[in-house]
Image (cartoon, rainbow, N blue to C red):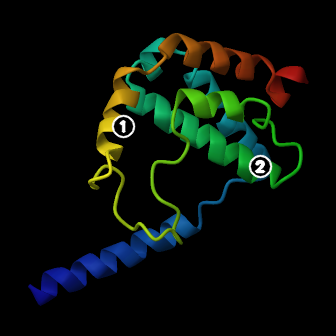
Amino acid sequence: MSKAATSLVEWSQSYLSELEQVRYSREQSKKLLEVIINKGTMPEQVADPEAAWQIAWATNVLSKEISRGSNDFLAPYRPELAKLVPLKIRPEPDSADKRPLGITEDGRLARRQKQLSDFPLDSFLKLFGEMRNSTPHQNK
């Protein structure tokens, strides 16, 4: 068992070293954001609510990272996006509640299931279409 564990640790450290060398430039990040936003306009990519949530999360995070507080492309869309899908899926790291979402007795699992069943696909597609049409790259 010790040999297998050591092997796993060595592989993990090697893999992490490779990942640390992958860094997107600001321009590459903007292109990636554009690709993800485009995916958000495709019904076949976002018909599954959880896939849509991932696209929304990636859009939200990338936009914040690219802007670093100024000229946040997503800022005008974020309030509407937050009404359509959850932009936070886990508690904050410093939250008193360290349990994963849905593993509590406070009804979060039921709320999550309701969000899934009530996912507003048409509104999501429309909002991502608006975002796609106003991305900085579209306005060059």
Q: Residue at x 77, y 49 (%)?
A: 66
Residue 112 — which label?
1
Residue 66 — which label?
2
Q: Mark 2 is on which residue type?
A: Ile
Front-most of residues 139 and 61: 61
Number of residue marks:
2
Seen in the image, is 12 located left or right of residue 40?
A: left
Front-most of residues 67 and 96: 96
What's the CA distance linking mark 2 and mark 1? Answer: 29 Å
Front-most of residues 117 and 43: 117
Seen in the image, is 21 located left or right of residue 17?
A: right
Q: If you read the primary sequence from the N terminus, does the residue marked by circle 2 or circle 1 appear first?
A: 2
Residue 75, quarter of the rendered image:
top right
Within 10 Å of disc 1 (Cα), the crowding (few <14, some 14-19, many 20+) is: some
Query: Residue 96 appears at what percent x and percent y?
Result: 46, 71
Q: Residue at x 51, y 64 (%)?
A: 19
* Quadrant that contains the C terminus: top right
Q: Residue at x 81, y 55 (%)?
A: 68
Residue 115, quarter of the rendered image:
top left
Label 1, secondary structure: give it. helix
Residue 19 — which label?
none
Query: Residue 53 appears at what percent x and percent y?
Result: 48, 34
Q: Mark 1 is on which residue type?
A: Arg
